[in-house]
Amino acid sequence: MKTTMNRRGFLKASALATGGMMLEFSLPLSAIGEELGTLVGSGELNAYVKIASDGTITIYSANPEMGQGIKTALPMIIAEEMGARWEDVVVLQSPVDDSKYGRQGAGGSTTIPRSFDLMRQVGASAREMLIGAAAESMEVPRGELEAKDSKVTSTSGHSLTFGQLASLAVKQPIPDPDTLKFKDPEDYTIIGTSVSGVDNLVIATGMSRFGIDTSVPDMLYAVYHKCPAIGGKAVSFNEAEIKKLPGIVDAFIIDGNGDVNQLLSGVAIVGRDTWSVFAAKDALKVKWDESAASKDDWDEIVRTGERLQDKGGGNVIYRAGDVDLALRRHTDRTIEADYSYPFVAHLCMEPMNTTAHYKKGSASTGDEIEAWVPTQAAYRIPSVMNDVFGVSEKNVTIHQTRLGGGFGRRGSAEFVCEAVAISKRAGKPVKLTWTRPDDMQHDFYRVAGFQHVKGSLDKQGRLVAWDQHFIGMTRNGEGPSGSRFSPSEFPLLNLPNTRGTMSTFDIGTPCGPWRAPGSNTHAFVVQSFIHELATLAGRDHLEFLLEIMGERRWLEPGNIRALNTGRAIDVIKLVAEKAGWGRDMPEGSGLGLAFHFSHAAHVAEVAEVSVDTQKRLRVHKLWAVADVGPIINLSGATSQVQGSIIDGLSTMAGQKITMSGGRIEQHNLDDYNVMRIAQAPDVEVHFIQSDNRPTGIGEPGLPPLAPAVGNAIFAATGVRVRTMPLTDLGYRLV
């Protein structure tokens, strides 16, 4: 007799054969995931819990890990609801499989808010199945049993370990999610504690496997050289000379499809080791057709932005009250200012790379692609492979590696397309590695921008009018992430007379999401100008900022993406308290305050700086307070805020991308200023553990940094900071 077994049955049976338990779930995104929106879209999230007979609990983490800590945080939620001891847990990165895990991706600080309830369901379901197994084994009612410390214990004191129960628990029905009851936060033993990252040891000892560490049998090595003027096309190169160099196997031109997001034209060099292909790349002499390439020039971009600042106008994004009337009534207490900020690079520690194998197939099976990729969006790659190479999505296998930094940069797939195209020509697996200049000159940069802001005060020194003109940029008519002006931007909804307008102009330089897109520059403008207004009013900045918040309310009730003024007030007050706001400061020193709401998180920061007569700037200490709901891993959350602040300070202090004739002028760390460890300040982080839904923390700590430091510089020197980086103003971080 022929029998069949479905996948769930097979997995359960396989686990039983080894005396363990393999638990599979397929859970839909919750309503909160739909509200948040996400880089990775919506769909189903699958999570697996495996319990071995020796008591080892293996939890799979499905989302990309790039230093944001979710490979630790998500399993912590599952383990908490299971009643497991964290010491018994082993965490593994799951394979990429959208049939099991849905769209696996990371970005926008959305992983925790999208996954929190789902991970609780996974853990609680496992707990109930273990309790059901114990009830049968002990022959006692379920109500007399409790799962805790990796065992199920009865009211009489008898207990069985999860390992002992595993083979029986796998036979239990998976509970209906609607019947599950979650632990009271008062009873948490894992969530809210400080847990070391599950990969910390292998990273510290150099054993962690990033994409750049990939090695597969019979692998070749490659580089890919694209036109320095973005979008140029390779015409010819010194092919014979390159092919004669030591270690070189082949060199050839790839025409590409002209899409900067997929496959631009360039010269590929394939060899037997990375050193050989890098050396050969230095010897390249390429003739380029730049007729369709970018012609961007930084000086011209600045002139265009400043012209639009002076011109005013723009499309109205938001309007409330009568701004013009309010401004006319208070002309003697009105100020206006121009702000600007440059393009900046992502500068991930690990340059872009992919190991790919293009496999020729038969007419019936079709060609196949297998790739090992440090990507934030593995789910996107199969469709791109289909678009570019005509390979069926079902024939594309992606292996998710750990990412050496992302910050939005690794959401694209152009470096994957390059590796696949080279492998297709080479007929073997190929590891493509970008050089640091490749990485810096072919980035999707944080978009530059310009803003003009005007505000008026009444006789009591209260802010009564706010007029903000945002000048952004588009590419081929579309605005990149970070070059948008939202009607809900603070403080448009907080004041009676406000207007927000937007102008744009087209550029050829590709731009994309960069840590806290939009917020990282919007906060600089708004929080700096609020301080200018407080100074004009002769009022304390803390008092002035709190007054703008008004009464405690949710500006858009029920929308987690909207500002909650009560939560804002609490973080502002607490950071002021922690920093000793209002204390006397030595000459040449000052404190600066800033707040910003982004990615559903409320964050306030205070900076303490000193500036000498030669404009040598020392940032002594930063205080940060955040309300992101319940903290999953206190250690990881603290690290994220500290990292955001250091990243923000390094960027503000001296990072700037410029271009001439479409060519990026910065090449490496010698001409792109990155803060050194000796310049880093002490960073003190505090959290308000609220009952609100959990939100992300990988990005929201960055936006308040720049205005806090700029306001502190004014407090120390009386000189305003209205542009970044600080090196353009003559400051030097020491």
Image (tube, rainbow, N blue to C red):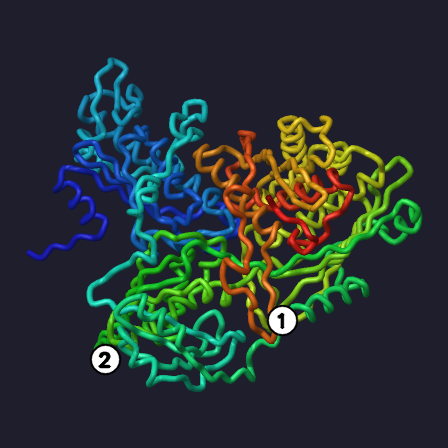
Which quarter of the rendering shows the N terminus? bottom left
- Report the side of 455 relative to 669 (left or right): right
Residue 79: where, in percent of width, then height? 34, 33
Which residue, given by chain and number where applicable, does mark 1 sit on? 507
The reply to whether residue 641 is in sight is yes
**What residue is at 70 percent from the left and 32 percent from the top?**
552
**What residue is at 40 percent from the left and 65 percent from the top?**
434
Q: Quadrant of residue 610?
A: top right
Residue 621: where, in percent of width, then height? 60, 35
Instruction: Tell me the amino acid under the disc marked 2.
Output: Ala
Which quarter of the rendering shows the C terminus? top right
- Report the side of 110 relative to 20 (left or right): right
Q: CA distance from mark 2 to mark 1?
A: 44 Å
Q: Quadrant of residue 219?
A: bottom left
The foreground one among 281 and 353 is 281
**What residue is at 69 percent from the left and 44 percent from the top?**
710
Which residue, given by chain and number where applicable, does mark 2 sit on? 363
Instruction: Tell me the amino acid under the disc marked 1.
Output: Ile
In the displayed structure, 97 sits above or below 507; it is above
Q: Residue furthest top?
A: 156
- Report the side of 684 relative to 315 (left or right): left
- The 10 Å Cα crowd at callout 2, few under 14, some 14 to 19, many 20 or more, is few
Residue 134: where, in percent of width, then height? 22, 26
Disc 2, disc 1: CB below 8 Å?
no
In the displayed structure, 424 sits above or below 213; it is below
For the image, the number of numbered tags is 2
Q: Quadrant of residue 255?
A: bottom left
Question: Which of pointers 2 and 1 lies earlier in the amino acid sequence?
Answer: 2
The foreground one among 81 and 638 is 638
Secondary element at image label 2? loop
The foreground one among 139 and 491 is 491
